[in-house]
Image (cartoon, helix red, strand yellow):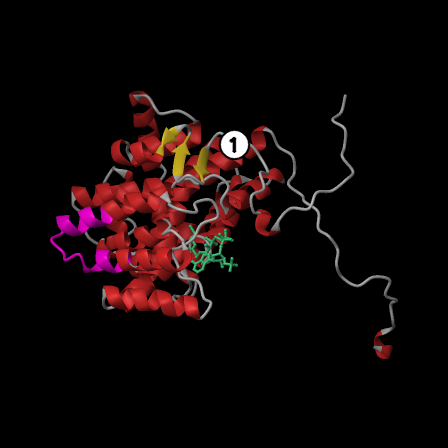
Amino acid sequence: MHEKRVSTTIKVPKGLYGVIVTQTQIAKSSVDGSLVYRGYSINELAEKASFEEVAFLIMKGHLPKKSELDEFSKALQQNREIPEPVLQLVNHLPQDSHPMDVLRTAVSSLGTLESTLSNEQKQLSIASKMPSLATLSYPHTRSNVKKADYSNYSSFFLEMLSSRKPDSFESWIFERVLMLYLEHDLNASSFTVRVVASTQADVYAAITAGVCALKGPLHGGANEDVAKVLNSLPTAEAARTFVRETLAKGLKVPGFGHRIYKKVDPRAQICKTLLKRLLNHKGLTEELYEKCVAMEEEMWNQKRLPANLDFYAAPIFMVLNIPIPLYTPIFAASRVFGWIAHYNEQLLDNKIIRPDAEYVGPQNLKYTPIEER
Ligand code: COA
């Protein structure tokens, strides 16, 4: 028996606010300020796990055994190298292109070179290459791509991004941030990936679309805007004034607000602690931390909006000497594991995602020949 087709339509709120459109076993963010990856609290993972463990968990559905982790980590290392045609293509793009534009072009071009790989190999290839592709996306770090020789994913990535050898604590901090960026249930870019997957397009098409959706300032692009704001504010008092003036103009303050978290974004709070630890580790003053806290307090007092992950990830990247244009590409290089998990989950029980729209345009118009218009 076929499932009975329902002919009536349902109107949903703008932006699909509060609408459940699918089931997932990958992750869950909740209004109470919690986030779980495959059933594990992000707080525990961010304290105890490695990036590769969490990436495996998200992609495969369980924490890896030692042998599985070794194999996965080795595969990520062995598939890092960027094919020459992609390097050449990137070098031909305008030098002042936004790195996210370069990244989407690079991911897309990879698809033209690897069409004969199995689906599993394609997914591994994209995920392994993302740190190098992200580094390539910015002309000032482009030459770093082949230099780093760390085997650990996050140290390798951070060395390329910051153009220097990070110490082990810096790498550990960066690894936590990458883990927190790795997956976030049905955010705009993961939903985009699922829409593309639902058409049965290949994984390169889906990930390219994910990169495109991530670019916007309401999504991944916010971390770059946060850094620019923080750099422009000399003191904590100036930070409070900035918040008040921005809100008074009816503008958004980057790094605040969230569709799911209304009181607290757990990822932001973990990063807040990491930022303080990093500043102390490097013997720096807490001026940057104090500016962040001032903005966070003022936003809560004025608008009851919590700081989101981008708000506290950006200052960590600043302290790690990573150029601002690379912040959103870093997000993409981590989220790619979540995107791949969503791509696969969509195809496990697929139905093309094709909603309807209420037509509110003109009706019953009569065509007139061009010379009579
Ligand atoms: N600054 C000022 N006002 C904000 C705001 C911000 N950062 N974020 C939300 N608001 C306002 C909205 O305009 C809305 O006001 P209104 O009721 O007068 O229309 C109200 O707060 C509630 O917003 P909400 O409906 O909860 O937001 P959303 O779910 O539609 O959008 C975001 C969520 C993330 C897109 C939104 O908060 C935002 O644009 N934030 C800034 C960009 C950002 O940091 N993005 C990264 C997200 S992880």
Percent from the top left, x then y, of residue 340?
Answer: 47, 37
In the picture as drawn, the residue positioned furthest to the left comes out as 283
Q: Would residue 242 be visible to someone looking at this image?
A: yes
Q: Would residue 147 be visible to someone looking at this image?
A: no
Residue in the picture at 13% in, 51% down: 282
From the viewer's perspective, is residue 182 above or below residue 135?
A: above
Percent from the top left, x then y, of residue 114?
Answer: 49, 41
Q: Is residue 366 left or right of residue 95?
A: right
Residue in the picture at 38% in, 48% down: 331
Frontmost residue, 355 versus 18: 18
Which type of secondary structure does the marked residue at label 1 adopt?
loop
Percent from the top left, x then y, of residue 175?
Answer: 28, 41
Give the residue type at disc 1. Answer: Thr
Percent from the top left, x then y, of residue 63?
Answer: 36, 25
Q: Is residue 297 left or right of residue 62?
A: left
Q: Classify 10 Å Cα crowding around label 1: few (below 14), some (14-19), many (20 and above).
A: some
Residue 288 falls inside the magenta stretch = yes
Residue in the picture at 60% in, 52% down: 14
From the viewer's perspective, is residue 321 above or below residue 190?
A: below
Numbered label tally: 1
Determine the main secondary structure of the stretch shown in magenta. helix
The quarter of the picture where the C terminus appears is bottom right
Task: Report the magenta residues as a range.
Answer: 274-292
From the viewer's perspective, is residue 297 above or below residue 333?
A: below
Badge 1 is on which residue?
24
The quarter of the picture where the N terminus appears is top right
Residue 208 falls inside the magenta stretch = no
Residue in the picture at 56% in, 47% down: 17
Frontmost residue, 221 versus 301: 301
> Quarter-wise, where is residue 334 in the image?
top left
